[in-house]
Structures are given as structure tokens and as C-alpha cells.
């Protein structure tokens, strides 16, 4: 690899672009490894007789902090069935509006159609899970090729490179997607995280929840209505499908869900 600018004709390491694939807007490219960035900012100026620029010492400090944090935060590895209990507890804190149990996480991971290509990962520190990410191609709705990503990191382990490592792993898995979308809960830090990666907000919804343990529930008559468990109406699958479509869950005429 040959550099330009004030480093024109200098030989750079072959593995300099060994970082993950990232994206800003519609531009995708390999990221310069942090180690290579340190080398370029510390050793190259001295070797070629160029003084460090004013911002280089600040950049060096940030790079060293990120590398130290990534090292301390342990490994990113694929989600396994035995991780489900810890992940469900983590999600209860990070995304309280969406109820996920260990059983639902295991089922979601294995029951979706193959075209979804669902994969999930965990960030492990010691024996504990401090971060979780999941990525898949949206298999419902009429828009093919849309990749969806969700990443969450425990609050006391943020700004250490954990979220970025999970995010880059998810983006790499969705290589070839025509569009990436991300869901952000009521989390300003999460919104800033995705906006820094080229995303813009295009939709929002209000989600409410009720904890029956903290309120008084009064029984009221509901003329003509009954509440039934889903298992009692499974044979009415066509009616359920049409209702879900009219409610916006599956657009009518979806070619992948006839």
C-alpha cells in the first residue's frame, strides 16, 4: 500500500486496512486498524522527519483508550442457547418495552425462515455478558434486501469499543443488503451511536407498558368481546393473517407471505 499527501511514496503495512467494513451513508470501505493508526501517528512522523500535527497527540490518546477498552471488554462471539438467560436479563434493562424471555430468544434464533439469515452475538467479559447484537434480513413485508440491526451494551461498559465491535460484526454479516435499518429505544446515546454511522431517523412510535404488580385492575364488562389464548384460534390462521395485515404487521399482498 502506498500513501499520498505528505507521505507520498511511503510504503505502508499490507494489513493496514485489516479493520471491519464500515459505512458512512452509501459509502462502504475497510477501516484502518487502530494499531496501524497509532503507528502512522507516532512512528511515521519521526521516521520521515515530519512533526506531529496539533491534533495527533489527542488522536493517539483516544486510540490507546479504545484499544485498552476493547481488550478489557473481552471477546465477541456468536450467541449460543445457554446465553439466553443472561441475554434476556440484559434486554430487560436495555429494552424494557419489548419482553424477551430466554425461551423466546432461543426460539427466534432457530424458527425464522432461512431467508432471514438471523445471527446474534454476545460481548463477554469474564463469565458475564455485557453486550448483545442481532442482525437479519427482513423476511416479512414487501421490501426484500433490507437488513435490520439491533445492538445493546450494558451502561457501565459503554464507550469502550464494545458496541462498535458488535455493530461491525453485524454489518459484516449483512453484507449485500440494499438498505440497513436500526431500531433505537428511548436512548439518546443509542440514537447518537447510529447517527454517527450515517443513519437518519425516519419513523417513531410510542410504546406503553403496564405492570399489573404496581396498579389496581378493575374488571369491566366487554359486550361482545372475549379474550382467548392464541392456541384456541390457531385453526383460524387465514383470519389471523388478514387481521395482522390490516393492522400493519404484514402488508397485504406481500409476495413472500401469500
Image (tube, rainbow, N blue to C red):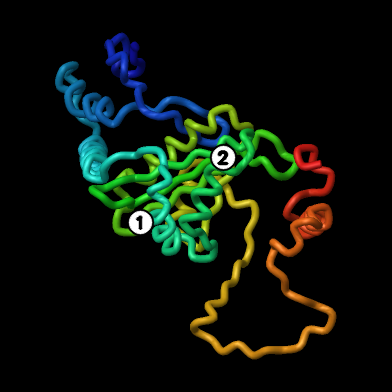
**Quadrant in which residue 8 is drawn:** top left
Q: Quadrant of the N terminus?
A: top left
Between circles 2 and 1, the one closer to the viewer is 2
Q: Quadrant of the C terminus?
A: top right
Of 86 and 73, which appears nearest the observer? 86
Q: Is residue 215 left or right of residue 2?
A: right
Measured as percent of width and height from the top left, residue 237 is found at 79, 54
- Asked if labels 1 and 2 touch by Cβ distance under 8 angstroms, the answer is no
Q: Is residue 238 left or right of residue 99?
A: right
Of 159 and 59, which appears nearest the observer? 159
Taking the spot 52% from the left edge, 41% from the top edge, the residue there is 135
Of 14 and 148, which appears nearest the observer? 148
For residue 54, say whether it is visible: no
Across the whole image, how many numbered discs are drawn on residues? 2
Provide the residue designation for mark 2: 136
Q: Which type of secondary structure does the marked residue at label 2 adopt?
A: strand
For residue 92, say whether it is visible: yes
12 vs 242: above or below: above
Taking the spot 49% from the left edge, 84% from the top edge, the residue there is 214
Specify few, some or many for label 1: CA neighbours under 10 Å numbering under 14, 14-19, or 20 or more.
Answer: some
Q: Which mark is residue 82?
A: none
Q: Which type of secondary structure does the marked residue at label 1 adopt?
A: loop
Taking the spot 40% from the left edge, 56% from the top edge, the residue there is 85
Q: Which mark is residue 154?
A: 1
Specify few, some or many for label 2: CA neighbours under 10 Å numbering under 14, 14-19, or 20 or more.
Answer: many
CA gap between label 2 and label 1 equals 22 Å
Measured as percent of width and height from the top left, residue 14 is found at 31, 14
Measured as percent of width and height from the top left, residue 162 is found at 34, 45
Answer with mark 2 or mark 1, whichever residue precedes in sequence: 2
Measured as percent of width and height from the top left, residue 70 is found at 27, 41
Taking the spot 50% from the left edge, 32% from the top edge, the residue there is 173
Q: Is residue 90 left or right of residue 244?
A: left
Amino acid at each position: 500500500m502506498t500513501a499520498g499527501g505528505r507521505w507520498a511514496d511511503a510504503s505502508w503495512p499490507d494489513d493496514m486496512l485489516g479493520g471491519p467494513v464500515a459505512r458512512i451513508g452509501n459509502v462502504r470501505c475497510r477501516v484502518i486498524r487502530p494499531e496501524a493508526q497509532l503507528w502512522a501517528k507516532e512512528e511515521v512522523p519521526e521516521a520521515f522527519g515530519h512533526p506531529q500535527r496539533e491534533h495527533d497527540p489527542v488522536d493517539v490518546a483516544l486510540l490507546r483508550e479504545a484499544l485498552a477498552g476493547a481488550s478489557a471488554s473481552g471477546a465477541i462471539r456468536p450467541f449460543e442457547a445457554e446465553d439466553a438467560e443472561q441475554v434476556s436479563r440484559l434486554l430487560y434493562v436495555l429494552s424494557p418495552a419489548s419482553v424477551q424471555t430466554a425461551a423466546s430468544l432461543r426460539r427466534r434464533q432457530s424458527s425464522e425462515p432461512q431467508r432471514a439469515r438471523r445471527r446474534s452475538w454476545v460481548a463477554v467479559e469474564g463469565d458475564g455478558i455485557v453486550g448483545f447484537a442481532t442482525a437479519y434480513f427482513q423476511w416479512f413485508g414487501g421490501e426484500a434486501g433490507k437488513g435490520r440491526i439491533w445492538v445493546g451494551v450494558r451502561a457501565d461498559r459503554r464507550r469502550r469499543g464494545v458496541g462498535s465491535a458488535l455493530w461491525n460484526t453485524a454489518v459484516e454479516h449483512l453484507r449485500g443488503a440494499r438498505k440497513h435499518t436500526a431500531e433505537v429505544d428511548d436512548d439518546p446515546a443509542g440514537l447518537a451511536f447510529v447517527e454517527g454511522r450515517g443513519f437518519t431517523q425516519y419513523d417513531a412510535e410510542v410504546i406503553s407498558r403496564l405492570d399489573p404488580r404496581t396498579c389496581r385492575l378493575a374488571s369491566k364488562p366487554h359486550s361482545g368481546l372475549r379474550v382467548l389464548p392464541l392456541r384456541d384460534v390457531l385453526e383460524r390462521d387465514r383470519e389471523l393473517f388478514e387481521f395482522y395485515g390490516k393492522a400493519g404487521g404484514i402488508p397485504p399482498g406481500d409476495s413472500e407471505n401469500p
